[in-house]
Image (cartoon, rainbow, N blue to C red):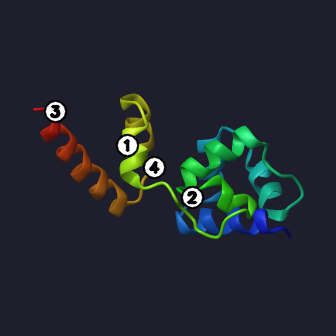
Amino acid sequence: MTLTADRIRQSRKDKDFTLQELANLMQVNKSTIVKWENGTNAPRLATLEKLSGFLEVDKGYLVGTQNERRTQSLTEFVESTDENQLIYHYRHLSRENKDILKTLAGLMFEKQK
């Protein structure tokens, strides 16, 4: 087992995703997720970007170059992401992060007035 494999598995479990749910989000077969979590295969860099987004952790955390799960704040994420991507990602956020995002969206809307 590798550090990346362990961190993918733990991050998936922290988000309460089943193997199949994560596979569906990533648009890969469930066996691909199993191989990542067993350390048999490793996701490519572009795939790690997508995976880190769904798991709400930095890709550096997944590959073991950092110990912090997330260095980009939710505010930074919102400000650097277009509206369609935000709507897409919103569906996969934890309840706590959905509440934070709603608050941030309200503040940003107020700023624009």
The residue mark sitting in front, 4 or 3, is: 3
Residue 13, quarter of the rendered image = bottom right
Label 2 belongs to which residue?
A: 57
Looking at the image, tell me whether mark 2 or mark 1 is earlier in sequence order: 2
Q: Nearer the viewer, mark 4 or mark 2?
A: 2
Q: Residues within 10 Å of mark 3 (few under 14, many from 20)?
A: few
Q: Position of residue 61 (x, y in %)?
A: 66, 62
Q: Nearer the viewer, mark 4 or mark 1?
A: 1
User: Label 4: how many residues lie within 10 Å, few (<14), some (14-19) or many (20+)?
Assistant: some
Q: Is residue 99 left or right of residue 53?
A: left
Residue 112 is marked as 3
Q: In what element is the residue under mark 1?
A: helix
Residue type at tag 4: His
**Residue at mark 4 to residue at mark 2: CA–CA distance:** 13 Å
Mark closest to the chain's N terminus, 3 or 2: 2
> In the rendered structure, which disc, 1 or 3, sits on the residue that comes first in sequence?
1
Question: Disc number at residue 3?
Answer: none
Q: Earlier in the sequence, mark 4 or mark 3?
A: 4
Front one among 84 and 66: 66
- Type of amino acid at the residue the image marks with label 1: Val
In the picture of the structure, the residue carrying the numbered disc 1 is 78
* First in sequence: mark 4 vs mark 2: 2
Q: Residue at x 52, y 59 (%)?
A: 71
Looking at the image, do the residues carrying marks 2 and 1 touch, with CB atoms under 8 Å apart? no
Closest to the camera, between mark 1 and mark 3, is 3
**What number is the disc on residue 92?**
4
